[in-house]
Amino acid sequence: MTDKFVPTAEAAVADIFDGATVLVSGFGLAGQPIDLLDALAAQGARDLTVVCNNSGSGDEGLARLIRLGRVRRLIASFPRGAEAMAFEEAYARNALEYECVPQGTLAERLHAAGAGLGGFFTPTGYGTALAEGKETRVIDGRGYVFEAPLHGDFALVKAQAADRWGNLVYRKAGRNFGPPMCTAARTAIVQVAHAVPLGGLDPEHIVTPSIFVQRVVVLNGASVTERKAA
């Protein structure tokens, strides 16, 4: 029987390797998998390419990874949010490469990767510095920029609840970049607050089907030991 639960965040991220591309869910702090990111900081992988809407805040999660010098390249829409000192300091001393991707383009590049598409043309960024070095076309009199899909080796995602097969539901604004990131990564690792038995999730409410999830760790909820003993 399939059981995708793992006992700890440390075990969940143990095989993330140096140089990996890691997709990180979150819109600001909503839906950001802080515990998985802190476990990755302790694990020690470096030279990472991180794809995220933001760059983290304060000194936890993604901000901690950046401050420790583990992130070589950040692909994000809005890295200079509240308390984004780690990013600003690293970028100012050229310790971090940054690629600016408009928010809708970021979401669609992830969707393209998950859907097996070769890319798409968008008018966003046409005629600006964001289009430099990219293929452009004029279609029906309007300029477009070609954008490639964004694949990940791993996705670190926060959801609200999961069953042991890995079906996921999210909480409110926590449902942001998580669903497309699960489809765009080879290995999707998800932290959830609650584990539920098979059949405990309304099929109409499942946002990410289990086929796109490889590992789940329960944090801020019942432990895996407690779940198995129930």
Image (tube, helix red, strand yellow):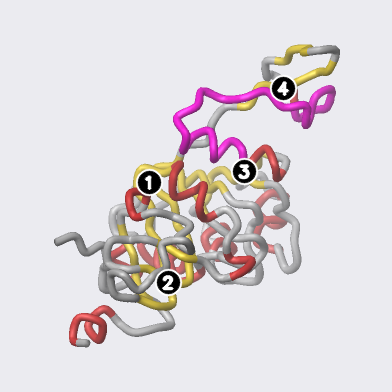
Q: Which span of residues is magenta-colored?
A: 108-130
Mark 1: amino acid: Asp
For mark 3, what is the residue?
107
Please name the amino acid that badge 3 sits on. Answer: Ala
Q: Which residue is mark 2?
A: 161
Q: Nearer the viewer, mark 1 or mark 3?
A: 3
Q: Is 207 displayed left or right of 57 in the figure?
A: left
Give the image location of residue 71, x and y in percent.
52, 50
Q: Are marks 2 and 3 in contact (CB under 8 Å)?
A: no
Judged left or right of residue 68, residue 91 is right
Determine the secondary structure under disc 1: loop
Q: Quadrant of residue 216?
A: bottom left
Instruction: Please give the residue where the numbered disc 4 appears in the rendered image.
Output: 145
**Does the stretch in magenta take in 124?**
yes
Residue under numbered circle 1:
18
First in residue order: circle 1 vs circle 2: 1
Q: What is the CA distance from the residue labelled 2 to the residue labelled 3? A: 23 Å
Residue 226 - label: none
Earlier-in-chain disc, 4 versus 1: 1
Q: Give the CA distance from mark 4 to mark 2.
A: 38 Å
Q: Measure the alpha-carbon separation of dots 4 and 1.
A: 32 Å
